[in-house]
Amino acid sequence: MVHGLRHHLVLFAGLSLGVLILPGCAGPGKKLEPPRITLTHIQVQEIKVFETAFQIELRVFNTNDLALEIKGLDCEVELNDKHFATGVSNQKTKIPPYDTATMPVTVYSSVLDLVRSLIDSSTKEKLKYKLKGRLHLGGGLLVPSVVSFESEGELSLPEPTGTRAKNTSTARELS
């Protein structure tokens, strides 16, 4: 009887260890590559006395051989190395393997941050931007629940209806 109990304890300990180790993997022998995120569009959505809301569009590149189930994201936007806006999105998106999807995100900028950015950009044709944030993923034990990302590029100012962006990005898994 003691031998049977010991066998069950060893089996339970082994399974528990496996459950703790596997979340960093995307399958046997594979690691989840963090998706690349780029800013593709920004547009003023609403102007209020103390804040301005912008609708930004992010492109998410899934370079893995498994689908990514995105439950939401949070992000911060910097313009010319100064904080500009913060936002979150609860839009659920599933991106097939080796594919992309766009996600709309509403970001909010205080009047102070907006004025600071306008003064800083008044003599420039392009603005440097930096986007930092976290993707919140679903998908079970084999996929990390949070992946952080960074993206940077330039925004062209001349377009009056919105601004398209030139991008470079890096992403990393949040430990």
Image (tube, grey):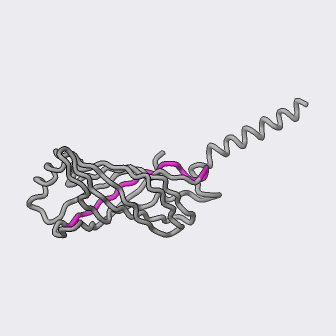
Magenta stretch bounds: 140-156
- Report if residue 56 lies within the magenta region: no
- Farthest residue to the top: give it: 2
Percent x, y of residue 38: 35, 62
Q: Residue furthest right?
A: 1
Name which residue lies at 77% across and 37% down: 10
What residue appears at the point 19 percent right and 44 percent down from the top-left corner?
50
49 with respect to 40 (left or right): left
Image quadrant of residue 128? bottom left
Q: In the picture, which quadrant includes the N terminus?
A: top right
Residue 81: x and y in percent read: 22, 51
Q: Nearer the viewer, residue 91 or 75?
A: 91
Above or below residue 107? Residue 43 is below
Give the camera-side residue of 1 and 77: 77
Report if residue 148 lies within the magenta region. Answer: yes
Total residue callouts: 0
Residue occupying image coordinates x 44% and y 56%: 91
Q: In the figure, 141 relative to 160: above or below?
A: above
Q: Is residue 84 left or right of residue 20?
A: left
Give the prevailing secondary structure in the magenta stretch: strand
Say which of 23 and 101 sits in front: 101
Q: Is residue 168 left or right of residue 172?
A: left
